Amino acid sequence: MHKIIFIYILMFVGIIQGQELNCEISINSDRITNINKQIFRTLESSLNEFVNKTKWTTQNFNQNERIECSMFINVSEVDNTTFTATIQIQAARPVYNSIYTSPIFNYNDKDFVFKYVEFESLNFNPNSFDSNLISVIAFYSYMILAIDADSFESLKGTPYLEMAQNVMSIAQTGGYKGWTQSDGLQNRYYMVSDFLSNTFNPIRNAYFEYHVNGLDKMADDLKGGKENIKLALMNLSKIQNVRPNAFLTRIFFDAKSDEITDIFKEGPTIQAAELVDVLNRLSPLNASKWSTIRF
């Protein structure tokens, strides 16, 4: 009897360690009036189960290590079984010795068209294209894993980026928009391809330096942590010099701009005039935020 209980406990621990994401998926269908709204509730429930119960990697994550993230799907049109939507993906990682979670990914994908029949099973096969719904969700699940890993160890997210790239390559056979070079310069194809390019290693290193040597140290050394965050951001100039207005630069600041502003307009001041100049060149769209930084 004791052996049976022990085996059961091990199985339970394996279950809570198996999954990597703690993702909340919600669907907005306010603009849809021509079908029964129950289908959206069914889809929402199925997607939450799919993302949170799929084992995306070979790594074991403890329950408290699961990555906090969300996906918001805004459906604008339904034609029979074809859904036209956008999807907003957000993710955050904990900060050492703090209850604060830092945003690491905030992206709105406007090219999200998929087919869905109520109650159909959602299963991910990394070697085949089953639906654009599954491919898009799987792609962003791996992107979340990659950016999170990079924020803890330099370039640690490469295996997950390669998995996302594999999803992208296979999804191209489906003919949906967002997966190829011909679909524009800011899409899933370029997102994962740029992250895997050595040209953009400074951005991936910035995720690490910003979080591990910056935010994670602020509880013990607030000013020192801010100095390290400044250095991480200054190093992004390496990208600006070779790829002005790069797609990944925009992705970085879409997640971090509000946090950066809060960090540098509060607490002990540091020499930030040069930083503000760099930020204005890196992300001019956020100039109004950078103007609030104290220096």
Image (cartoon, helix red, strand yellow):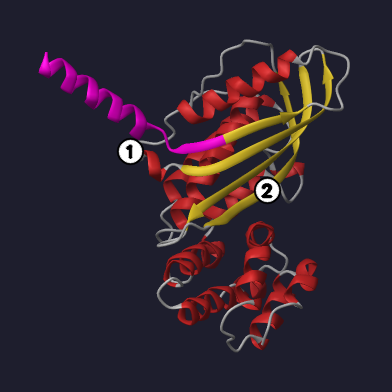
Relative to 263, does residue 190 appear above or below in the rendering?
Answer: above
Q: Amino acid at mark 2?
A: Tyr
Residue 148, image x and y in percent? Answer: 48, 51
Relative to 179, does residue 194 appear above or below in the rendering?
Answer: below
User: Residue 116 has which mark?
Assistant: none
User: Residue 60 has which mark?
Assistant: 1
Residue in front for this viewpoint, 162 or 48: 48
Mark 1 residue element: loop
Residue at left 51%, top 24%?
Answer: 124
Does residue 282 appear in this view? yes
Q: Amino acid at mark 1?
A: Asn
Residue at label 2? 107
Left or right side of 254 for 94: left
Residue at left 82%, top 20%?
Answer: 78
Confirm whether the magenta stretch covers residue 19.
Answer: yes
Left or right side of 116 for 32: right
Residue 279, image x and y in percent? Answer: 69, 75
Does residue 169 appear in this view? no
* Number of marks: 2
- Mark 1, Cα crowd under 10 Å, few <14 / some 14-19 / many 20+, is some
Please state the extent of the stretch shown in magenta in the rendering.
1-23
Residue in front for this viewpoint, 176 or 259: 259
